[in-house]
Image (spheres, rainbow, N blue to C red):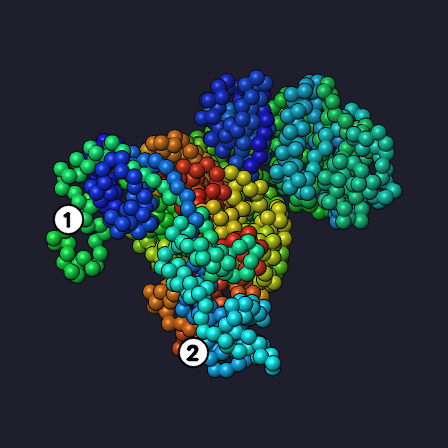
Amino acid sequence: MPKIEVKQAGLERYSTLKPSVDELTEMLPAVKGEVDEVNRETGVLKLEFNDTNRPDLWSTAGAGRALRSYYTGWLPTYEFFSRPARSLPDDGRRVTVDPSLAEVRPYLAAFALRGPAMDAVTLDDLIQTQEKLCWNFGRKRKSIAMGVYRSQSIHYPVRYQAVDPKTTRFQPLGLEKTLSLSEILKEHPKGVEYGSIVAGLPMFPFLTDSGGEVLSFPPIINSAHLGAVQVGDQELFVEMTGTDLPSLTLAVSIVACDLADAGYTILPVTVEYPYDTPFGKTVTFPYYFQEEVKAELGFINKLLGINLVGEEAQNALAKMGVTSRYGNGMLTVIPPVYRNDFLHPVDVAEDVAVGRGLASFEPERPSDATIGRLTDAELFGRRVRDLMIGMGFQEMIFNYLGSRHDFIERMNISGDDVVQILNPMTENYEYVRNSIAPNLLEAEGVSGNALYPHHIFEVGKVVRLEPSHREGSVTTNSLGWLSAAPDEGFNQINSRVAALLYYLGKDYKVKESSDPRFIPGRAAEVWIERKAQPEFAGVFGEVHPAVLENWNAGIPCTLGELNLDVLAR
Amino acid sequence: MDQDTLVKSLHPLEVKVLLTFGPGVPLTAGVLGEKLGYKVGQANQAFSWLCGKGLARETGRTSKTVYEITELGREQVAGGTPEENLLKALDNGPVAMADAAQLLGLEQKDMGSAYGQLAKEGLVAMDETKRIVKKAAQSPRLKTLRVLLQKAAEADLDESFLTDDEKAILSANAKKRGAAASVFKVSERETVVYELTPEAGSAVAIIRAQGVTGDELGALTPALLTSGAWKTGVFRPYNVAAPPSRLVIGRRNPYQEYILGVKDKLVSLGFEEFDGPLVETEFWNGDALFMPQFHSARDIHDVYYVKNPTHAKEIEQPWLDRIAAAHTNGGDTGSRGWGYNFDRDFTRRLILRSQGTVLSAKQLPHAKIPGKYFGVVRCFRYDQVDATHGADFYQTEGIVLGSDVNLRTLLGLLKMFAIEVAGATEVKYVPGYFPFTEPSVEVHIKHPVLGWFEMGGSGIFRPEVTKSLGVDVPVLAWGLGIDRMALMSLGLSDIRELFTANIENVRLRRRS
């Protein structure tokens, strides 16, 4: 969920509204946003936007534009877009692309702009837009990276090339010396942060002008010279490189519209590819590539449970900044230049619903009569819980993740069947439990001050690796219980198992168990009698003093665990 | 305590003392034993209670030396002392020292000291073949020792009543520091002297007035019932206001109780429960929910990956092909899709379930129409554990399928949950965003006590999800944040407390 910082004054300027913070809080949900933080001294608001398919909202200009449409009915138009049928003149602003980039970082989109001297607020906003677009929408620069340059010094055509990382050198922004591209990955902070995107490539992307002056090493860092944009600049060149041309093109459109709203003239730039792209070999940006989406009004009405006529639906869409046509029961949506989130007619339906306002929908209770039911496992678990409670046990609920130390080492088990996490956040939560026993012993270990005797249990899930299974492991419902008392021993737990299985209606027999968690000769395996052959259901016995010592438990304990999926069969 | 309550609280042991003795008379445990037949323990109990109520007080203490019999001593009362046993053994003729020790089961040095004592008194001697021979049958010392042993077995011996001879014999056989096992133990005894206070007088008056004798019936025993003796007796009233002792009982975990309540409520609203494994595939956890494989929420830092095995053997067909098509170009769902090459290797990647919606998706191919389903299921998120984030936690999710469900019935469903499950008085809907629903709605509710908070998220499943999984009707999908409501209901503020290992905390916890 992207969060952006906006100046209240900036938002007022772009939205043409003057909402108080309270009013803004009421207004933002219409664009799936909320006020996250307010700094009343600086007038800076932190806004959160929930829709990850609406990167056009992640800037002061974009958020302001959406609010202006929704609350004033303004429908913005932008005249600087080339289309498949018609490219606008580029006045010689061209970028050539080297063929070897096809395998490296194939796409580049760009535009230039001219206008008033850049002020600090607009520049900060531009940098924030760059960060949010490239981080949230561009997958941390993997699929979109953006560079902004002082364009009056650029000699066109700009060349997008793939170069040898060892021999190509330039002075990156933020450092006083020239480095090779390979060295930048090791020594420049941005190289360290984003280096993994290019590290495995034989050649690295590189951007120069026709005079050989370096613009940048995308997607890592700009040059110290052309890439150092400052307050006061009046002419800029904006480019984005990446792996997916539609999302790159959309990102370029969003930034161009933001800057146009800020008062700049957007100047088209043509990119010449030596290979085919989804939009052809020569593309002039900003470029409108979005396709019209058709949605039957009847479909929308049914999905929303209402009965609108075409004009009402169109008015609702207009509030969302969306132009549309209507005829013969069919709505045709022309996506705004800065949006590409109409994948399906349901996306049109949602814009209609939000445009109308959710408050206008009268809630209606679903009328289908259906039969409610708990799972068999839940019903069986409830029977087991009731019996354990009847035997004086306190029910516990434990976390399922834990450490190697707790789940394996302290239990004196090999841990061969315990599921391990590849990317744990900490070693405290690195394994999924294969038994409830470690949780029960942990509870005993930390509860030496609680009045004895202790009788605790949990009905919960455990997971064991099972290589033959399609998913490599099996989740089972399990009952684990522990008793701790000075006079606790095998006889007591033996009686409890007998009582439990009697009331669950299970005939069983026991065998001596060699489970290392228990004292040898004082642990039993439970085998449920079946027609074919007995089925293993679990173990119980006196916990081995070595295990008790591992958990700092100073009172004798018995412990048992039974597979409820086996018992329920 | 007023006099009446005070009198009511009197135990028969106290009552008899009050009725038998007047104020100022010196009382000891011995006196109570003599006059009332109290055992020492009963006498001390009576004094302790009476003093506690201000009806008796301590007036002084005297100290005396007593000899107590030891365990070894008790054995010798019945089994004879080593000396007695040696003399008895010699009745059958002379015996060598070593043989005698073996015969009597004595250690060599104990045998030696028994022989030495007896020889000193001339009762035994050694013959020319080094065998022990009996010379006489009895000595005064042996006789006295036997008497003392038998007396001590019945009651401790008060030194002040003993003769010098007896004292000499006792101290020779009494335990000393560092000595081997002995038959007597010396100890200092303190006798405490009490007297009844003037207040006892008024208590006695009330007791007499009420006709209480101290012979009232205490616990109702099976013997009383069998004999019928209760018919002629009077039951002693108990102090019903006395503080009870603590009872630890078996009971449900209050968080589980909350969850059970939610489950039962949902069942009553016509929902059928679903469940599933904790280890899932990227396919069900994300792909089937139309989250593009490049979505930022599917990063390595958002989901826990299983280390080994890394991939499921296969994904169920035809769902794999159909979902892959929905991602690539929309397939037959009416969507244009995300327009990228679906990775069939990545989709088999094994992970820990990160959202309950997985099970809603898995239910779709098997769902009845119309149908309502729900689950309260454990999920895992790559999050720093703190007061609001657990390593694993419960999510409550579900779906409603029906040819006539729509946005208005979604709002109606949410309103029903708000009132029935969360006890809300007001409901507010705002547009939301989830990758798998369109439209999406967040529901905020006003609780009479807790004020406004977000109850959950919901929406209508995207056709890319439902059509790909074989469902042609709209499907409402919803999730409720019940752990937050459970925390509030239990008066807790830290989600980790719901899963605590602290037994005492769980025992004491209760619902408000």
Q: Is residue B373 left or right of residue B212?
A: right
Compare residues A495 and A500 and report the one nearer the observer. Answer: A495
The residue carrying mark 1 is B234
How many numbered marks appear?
Answer: 2
Q: Nearer the viewer, mark 1 or mark 2?
A: 1
Image x and y of residue B24, in percent: 27, 35
Q: Is residue A452 depicted above or below A321 in this figure?
A: below
Other-residue count near label 1 (Cα within 10 Å), few / some / many at <14 / 14–19 / ≥20: some
> Residue flagged by tag 1: what amino acid is it?
Val
Image x and y of residue A518, in percent: 52, 64
Residue at 77 percent of width and 27 percent of height: A228
Tell me the distance, in whole angstroms, between the alpha carbons under discs 1 and 2: 66 Å
* Quarter the C terminus of chain A occupies: bottom left
> Residue flagged by tag 2: what amino acid is it?
Ala
In the rendered image, which quarter is residue A180 located in?
top right
Compare residues B340 and A300 and report the one nearer the observer. Answer: B340
Compare residues B278 and B404 and report the one nearer the observer. Answer: B278
The residue carrying mark 2 is A532
